[in-house]
Image (spheres, rainbow, N blue to C red):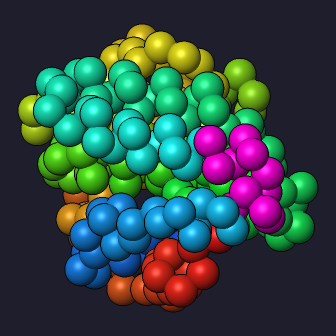
Amino acid sequence: MSDAPERHFMQITRRHLAQFAALCLGLMVTCNGLGWIELTNEMLLRVKIKHGDPAQHRLIQWQNLLSSAKGLPEHDKLKQVNDFFNLNVRFVDDVIQWKTEDYWATPLEFLATGAGDCEDFAIAKYFTLKELGVDESKMRITYVKALRHDQAHMVLTFFASPKSIPDVLDNLIADILPATQRSDLLPVYSFNGSGLWIAKARNAGKRVGNSDRLSLWNELKTRMLKKPF
């Protein structure tokens, strides 16, 4: 990515990047993946009453996935998690779904409502894979520009090794492909629980440190603990 397009895109997305940086540092706060909640029969009944039978079924399927995929090889975990969310949840913009411009749903909110935007897909996949034992150092929530749609987009990237070309888990397409085969995506920034990187190419990029903003993650964490649905 040349300096000129990068400067232009950074101006357009400054607010989004600040929010993503907030989540980056927030992920460093102690949190046991998705293990913070056990879906009881009472919770499932509340979901059924509020969101209907399909919502309850999605959560049961998700819990089954968390149990059945624990012992699988990493590649199979990636495929099963990517397929699960891509097939069971619809893309809906935040303005329509939540009546606000930006809202990061918890995995449970995402599954209960059955809809969300690209950020919700990437975050849900990240936490689900983390719960399945995939090391967070291998995963990055990656902010890109979707060139065909000419808009900001978010995906989950997976690095088999620190210097490898990452694989891309995306809600736009079904297949998990190496970043070198996703010429339609222009990487900008990526983050996980350990840091924040600026992406100069379709690889690990340059680490630029940690964020000092926690508000967005704290708000999300509060909802995860106190109001799961």
> Which residue is at a point 27% across and 51% down the rendered structure image?
130
Q: In which quarter of the image is residue 228?
A: bottom right
Instruction: Please give left or right for residue 88 compared with residue 133 in the image.
Output: right
Residue 49 in the magenta stretch? The answer is yes
> Which residue is at a point 33% across and 43% down the rendered structure image?
66
Nearer the observer, 75 or 1: 75
The location of residue 5, given as percent across then percent down, is 58, 41
> Which residue is at a point 69% across and 48% down the rendered structure image?
55
In this rendering, the answer to whether 200 lies above or below 196 is above
What segment is highlighted magenta in the picture? 47-57
Does the magenta stretch mainly form a helix, a strand or a loop?
helix
Instruction: Please give left or right for residue 178 compared with residue 41 in the image.
Output: left
Residue 59 in the magenta stretch? The answer is no
> Which residue is at a point 55% across and 35% down the rendered structure image?
85
Nearer the observer, 118 or 50: 50
Q: Quadrant of residue 91?
A: top right
